Amino acid sequence: MDTFAIGDHDYLLNDEPFRILSGAIHYFRVHPDLWEDRIMKARLMGLNTIETYVPWNEHSPTPGTFSAEGRLDLGRFLDLVDAAGMRAIVRPGPYICAEWDNGGLPAWLFSDPTVGVRSSEPGYLAAVGSYFGSLLPIVVERQVTRGGPVILLQIENEYGAYGKDKAYLQYLVDLVNRHGVDIPLFTCDQPIGTMIEDGSLPELHKTGTFGSRSLERLAFLRERQPAGPLMCAEFWNGWFDNWGTHHHTTDAAASAAELDALLTAGASVNIYMFHGGTNFGFTNGANDKGIYEPTITSYDYDAPLSEDGHPTEKYFAFRDVIAKHFPVPDDRPALRPRRGTSSLTLETSIPLLEAVEMLGHSATVPGTVPSFDSTGHYRGFCIYEKTIDHGGVLTVAEVRDRAQFFLNDAAVGVLSREFGERAVTIPGPGRLRILVEDQGRVNYGQRIGEAKGLLGPVSLNGNELLHWQITPLDFGNLELLAGLAKPLSPEAGVPGPSVSFGGFEADGPEDRYLRLDGWTKGNAFINGFNLGRYWSRGPQYTLFVPGPLIRNGYNELAVLELHGSISPVARFVAAPDLGPDGK
């Protein structure tokens, strides 16, 4: 078996100096049938290691559960890394940030207000212990010391930006050791202020996270860690996007120059991201530093390998830099092929408000208005309902994150957390229904773990409305709706909120790019798979459809449209469009 250790100056693989040239690929953001392709393209760029986070909330969506199958099969992903002749770095959190919903922490964890997350509070430690008890065996048996690819394991994640509870960090170290982790442990933090010291322990290997001023950042890290190899554990070569902003890009030549400086200095690196992937479904995170900003569906990140898995100008610039310092394979990946274009007309539709009973089970909650979380529903949409005997001004303490108001099924207004809106005029008496969307939980800072839904009191003309009926909506089986949908006029628009259906023929698996010009906001589904959110405000205007989702023969597109479209037409276009880059 191999050994891996941290020497005075170098990482040591079998007692020989080893420079880590790593790239980040999040298995949970990539269709599992495409993992092998993405890993191979990392190797062809000259990388020797793959790094991944592990999202606790995906593996354990409800208390006491743990799944590692399908797109969550971490073991299979690591085995593919091994088969490619590469090493692996695993970052299990329990907090990961990653612009992922709630930073990877399960929303159910926050249902008990006494639980103190990312701290040595006993209830939180017990939950982490249970989670690691299920997760770590997958990693332990794939350590380099047992014939596998895993050479490093991270303790927490940029903890110095959040807290400095040393007892908590020590608990994590002791926990992973008890489960048989015998590879080196490390922490990563920004080389700013006291973050590196606050987020680590004296015996843990410390690494930095940065994307510019590499030599200055490495010098800062060296001051705080006089011995051991230098590593940038997140070399930020791009950035993520929020709805309503531009698509973030970085200059390929400038990023390559920073990488060259880092490698010339003798440091190891993990390129974050090498391949970003996609926030499928309702998995995107959000930021809130005074303004709530949900992250878009694409996690392209302007990475060397694009969201749909093709090399970019940055890929080849990085490959050339790596080739100055280390051997790189002769083979080069092919550029993105030009795909065909086509359009399809969605043929049938059903109003969402007519389908509520088929999408979820209602419950009447006494007292003040309930949150999503109080019902055990943590993502997507809920319907709030109440009969009122007069109209007036309805106020909400806070909307998390977007609410559409309907009186007797007629739209009367929208309130958005992003814009700080809290009041809407209800024109009269009748059946009030409110469609509330969770647009993504905050993934960074002190606002992680916030409840979703309507935060009370909800009042009408100053009088609190109590005893609400709430229905969590589950879009996991749209076939129930398809059979009841009514024909659409091909010349007219599609009213919302609704779910519309249309079909198309295909010769088999092939990547596609879905464009919904003229539609407003919602989610799109291919053969029942939730591709993620679309929104006319941009910046992204296409949704990536991974080839493995496409069947040979008939395929079905379903569109959850929240407001309305100018026509029932959708298009598959030749290439992705993630919006203008703001330069």
Image: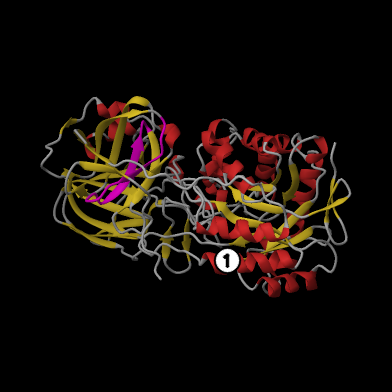
Residue 60 appears in the picture as rendered: no
Question: Looking at the image, which is closer to me, 419 or 338?
Answer: 338
Q: Quadrant of the N terminus?
A: top right
The vertical placement of 99 against 552, above or below, is: below
The vertical placement of 347 against 21, above or below, is: above
Question: Looking at the image, which is closer to me, 399 or 462?
Answer: 399
Question: Looking at the image, which is closer to me, 237 or 47?
Answer: 47
Q: Position of residue 138 (x, y in %)?
A: 70, 35
Q: Position of residue 351 (x, y in %)?
A: 21, 38
Residue 538 occupies quadrant: bottom left
Question: Looking at the image, which is closer to me, 48 or 169?
Answer: 48
Q: Residues within 10 Å of mark 1 (few under 14, many from 20)?
A: many
Q: Quadrant of the C terminus?
A: bottom left
Q: Which residues are magenta?
A: 509-528
What's the amino acid at mark 1?
Ser
Residue 98 occupies quadrant: bottom right
Residue 339 in the figure: left or right of residue 393: right
Name the secondary structure under disc 1: helix
The vertical placement of 152 against 504, above or below, is: below
Residue 180 appears in the picture as rendered: yes
Total number of numbered discs in the rendering: 1
Residue at horizontal 58%, vertical 52%?
Answer: 274
Colouring scheme applied when the structure was drawn: secondary structure
Q: Is residue 523 magenta?
A: yes
Residue 568 in the figure: left or right of residue 253: left
Residue 225 in the figure: left or right of residue 396: right
Q: Position of residue 307 (x, y in %)?
A: 47, 49
Which residue, given by chain and number where applicable, does mark 1 sit on? 255
